[in-house]
Image (spheres, rainbow, N blue to C red):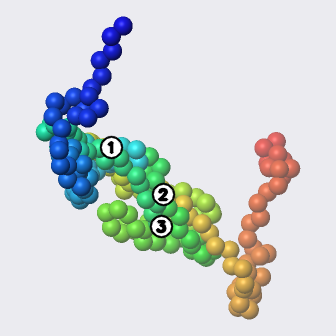
Amino acid sequence: MVQEVACPACGGEGRVVKDPCGSCGGSGRQTIEDMVSVDLPPGVAEGNYITVSGKGDEGLAGGGSGDLIVIIAEEENDVFERHGIDLFCTIDITFSEAALGTEKTIETLEGKVKLKIPEGTQSEKIFRLRGKGLPVLQSSQKGDMLVKVHVLTPEKLSREMKELFEKLGPIETKPKNLFEQLKDIIR
């Protein structure tokens, strides 16, 4: 049985560096940090990667440089939450704005837009702003912006607010219970 192995002194190169420098140890390569600017195309997402040719480690024995692989990691945003190509946000509106309707300014990636909230809007209703989401990678298509409306119920009422709600109470329509709904269906 015959076994061939590379020379432990020269690593199979056929020569030994007699006086190696301290920074590379005779390998001819040393570790340095370098900043590389990378252009990210619109639509990249968490886990996507970009290959930058020739910006990786130097090759052994004078070989060419390898490639740098940049793996995308997304940071959380205070305003938007990503759902694929769609963006999601929540806005608060007052009880009276929900009842009477209002118009709110919404921040998008392309700037501010107006969202018309119709009268009678219920809490947790979701409105869709078409084409205001994230771009699809290598496409002109865009996702949507989903805006959830959260109606704030007042926790503390002023005397004036309390009086107004007391006047409103007897005239507002109450939701029907299950029995009343069945009676309406049978009629």
The answer to whether 105 is drawn above or below residue 130 in the figure is: below
- Which residue is tagged 1? 49
Mark 1 burial class by Cα count in 10 Å: few <14, some 14-19, many 20+ = some
Q: Residue at x 77, y 82 (%)?
A: 166
User: Label 2 near label 3: C-beta < 8 Å?
Assistant: no
Q: At which x and y percent is residue 146?
A: 48, 56
N-term mark: 1 or 3: 1
User: Label 3 near label 1: C-beta < 8 Å?
Assistant: no
Q: Residue at x 24, y 55 (%)?
A: 22
Q: Residue at x 20, y 49 (%)?
A: 20
- Which residue is tagged 3? 78
The answer to whether 37 is drawn above or below residue 155 in the figure is: above
Q: Which mark is residue 39?
A: none
Question: Mark 2 belongs to which amino acid?
Answer: Glu
- Which residue is tagged 2? 81
Mark 3 burial class by Cα count in 10 Å: few <14, some 14-19, many 20+ = few
- Real-space CA distance between mark 3 and mark 2, rounded to the nearest whole angstrom: 8 Å
